[in-house]
Image (cartoon, helix red, strand yellow):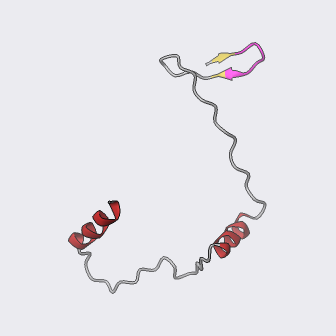
């Protein structure tokens, strides 16, 4: 790390290369929950208490079938 004449700090990697500047974080809305709900509504999403509830009946995972499906999606 070295300080520039104007007081700004420059960070360098061990090999001496200058680390790139990081952009400032995105602004956070004053009501992030309402902002997220508005975005979901605009996208047509309906998220509720049972959204993440699995729809299966408790049977064991068929690993072979899962791999077949995932393999097709990867292509």
Whole-percent x and y of residue 18?
Answer: 57, 22
Decide whether residue 7 is among the magenta residues.
Answer: yes
Question: Looking at the rendering, which quadrant does residue 4 occupy?
Answer: top right
Residue at the extreme bottom: 57
Q: Is residue 74 magenta?
A: no
**Residue 53 versus residue 2 in the image, above or below:** below
- Percent x, y of residue 58: 31, 83
Lateral position of residue 8 relative to residue 11, left or right: right
Q: Quadrant of residue 21?
A: top right
**Main SS type for the magenta part?**
loop
40 sits left or right of 51 in the view: right
Q: Residue at coordinates 71% horizontally, 63% vertically from top-left? A: 32
**Picture quadrant of residue 39:** bottom right
Q: Which residues are magenta?
A: 4-9
Outermost residue to the top = 5
Residue displayed at 59% across by 76% down: 45
Q: Residue furthest left?
A: 64
Q: Is residue 37 left or right of residue 60?
A: right
Across and down, in percent, residue 44 comes to 62, 77
In-front residue for pair 44/11: 44
Locate residue 46, reporting x and y percent. Answer: 59, 80
Q: Residue at x 33, y 87 (%)?
A: 57
Horizontal side, residue 46 vs residue 72: left or right: right
Q: Nearer the viewer, residue 17 or 42?
A: 42
Q: How many marks?
A: 0
- Which quadrant is the C terminus positioned in? bottom left
Quadrant in which the N terminus appears: top right
């Amino acid at each position: 790390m070295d300080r520039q004449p104007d007081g700004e700090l420059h960070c360098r990697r061990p090999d001496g290369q200058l680390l790139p500047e990081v952009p400032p974080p995105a602004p956070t809305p004053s009501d992030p929950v309402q902002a997220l709900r508005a975005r979901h509504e605009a996208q047509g999403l309906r998220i509720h208490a049972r959204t993440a509830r699995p729809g299966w009946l408790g049977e064991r995972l068929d690993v072979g079938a899962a791999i077949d499906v995932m393999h097709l999606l990867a292509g």
